Image (cartoon, rainbow, N blue to C red):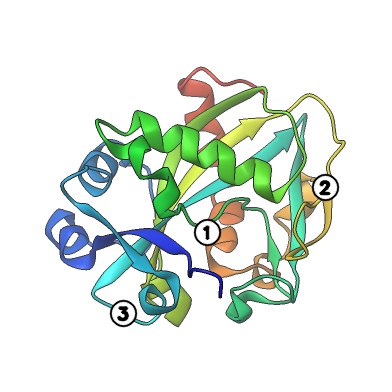
């Protein structure tokens, strides 16, 4: 019998102490050092974490950019999160498991390595430049209440891409002007991102990552 995945979590009360927000926050330096501290993280069975509202799961969420296009896909039925099936997404990433716990022994630097591994598991792309730009919180939905997103902008040199998992359906790069036209077709985290895409891209540029 396969061992259940244990995923990285933090206690919700930490977020409440720092300040609960809805949608996107650019204050990454306020939240992440606390939420990724080795003294504040723990690992729970994924089936328990999805139901226990005392905890939030930390999820890397990477927006992949090529020239003036953004990677978009549909959530397939092969994905474990059934509540997102059929919706568009521009975020690539997933849970960080207990197997990565050595990454968090000292600082947030280890999180970056975990994020890249998750990205490679989802899609076949070669990274060029990447930067952390925001965090996401959405307590208005069941899935959002038990997750906390960390948004990255990643630039790649070409559009060759393939989904590695069947939860990633028809990944393709679409012009950003097209991607932002109908926010209602996206899962909530992606909707926040496309509604504020210019702001996220601007922060990436100020961090030294240019298109």
| Label 1 Cα neighbours within 10 Å, binned few <14 / some 14-19 / many ≥20 | some
Image spot of residue 109 (x, y percent) = 36, 29
Cβ atoms at labels 3 and 2 below 8 Å apart: no
Image spot of residue 111 (x, y percent) = 40, 38
In the image, is 32 to the left or to the right of 58?
left
First in residue order: circle 3 vs circle 2 = 3
* Res 141 visible: no
Residue of label 2: 174
Residue at image point 53% right, 23% down? 205
First in residue order: circle 2 vs circle 1 = 2
Residue at image point 44% right, 78% down? 47
135 up-or-down from 208: above or below: below
Identify the image quadrant of residue 129: top right
Image spot of residue 93 (x, y percent) = 58, 51
Q: Secondary structure at mark 2?
A: strand
Residue at image point 24% right, 30% down? 106
Residue at image point 54% right, 68% down? 188
In the image, is 70 to the left or to the right of 172?
left
Pick out the residue farthest to the left.
17
Q: Secondary structure at mark 3?
A: loop
The alpha-carbon separation of the residues under discs 1 and 3 comes to: 24 Å
| Mark whose residue sits in front, 1 or 3 | 3
Residue of label 3: 52
Residue of label 1: 192
The alpha-carbon separation of the residues under discs 2 and 1 comes to: 18 Å
104 up-or-down from 47: above or below: above
The alpha-carbon separation of the residues under discs 3 and 2 comes to: 37 Å
């Amino acid at each position: 019998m396969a061992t259940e995945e244990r995923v990285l979590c933090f206690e919700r009360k930490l977020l409440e102490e720092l300040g609960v927000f809805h949608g996107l926050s650019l204050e990454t330096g306020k939240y992440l050092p606390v939420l990724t501290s080795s003294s504040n993280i723990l690992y729970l069975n994924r089936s328990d974490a999805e139901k226990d509202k005392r905890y939030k799961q930390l999820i890397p969420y990477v927006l992949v950019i090529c020239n003036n296009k953004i990677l978009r896909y549909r959530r397939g039925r092969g994905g474990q999160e059934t509540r997102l099936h059929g919706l568009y997404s521009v975020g690539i990433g997933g849970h960080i498991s207990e197997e990565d716990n050595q990454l968090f022994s000292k600082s947030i630097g280890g999180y970056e390595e975990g994020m890249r591994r998750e990205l490679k598991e989802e899609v076949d792309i070669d990274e060029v430049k990447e930067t952390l730009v925001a965090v996401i919180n959405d307590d208005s939905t069941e899935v959002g209440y038990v997750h906390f997103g960390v948004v990255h902008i990643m630039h790649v040199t070409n559009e060759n891409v393939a989904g590695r998992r069947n939860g990633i359906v028809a990944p393709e790069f679409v012009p950003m002007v097209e991607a932002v036209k109908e926010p209602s077709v996206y899962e909530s985290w992606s909707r926040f991102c496309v509604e504020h895409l210019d702001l996220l891209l601007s922060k990436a540029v100020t961090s030294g990552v240019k298109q």
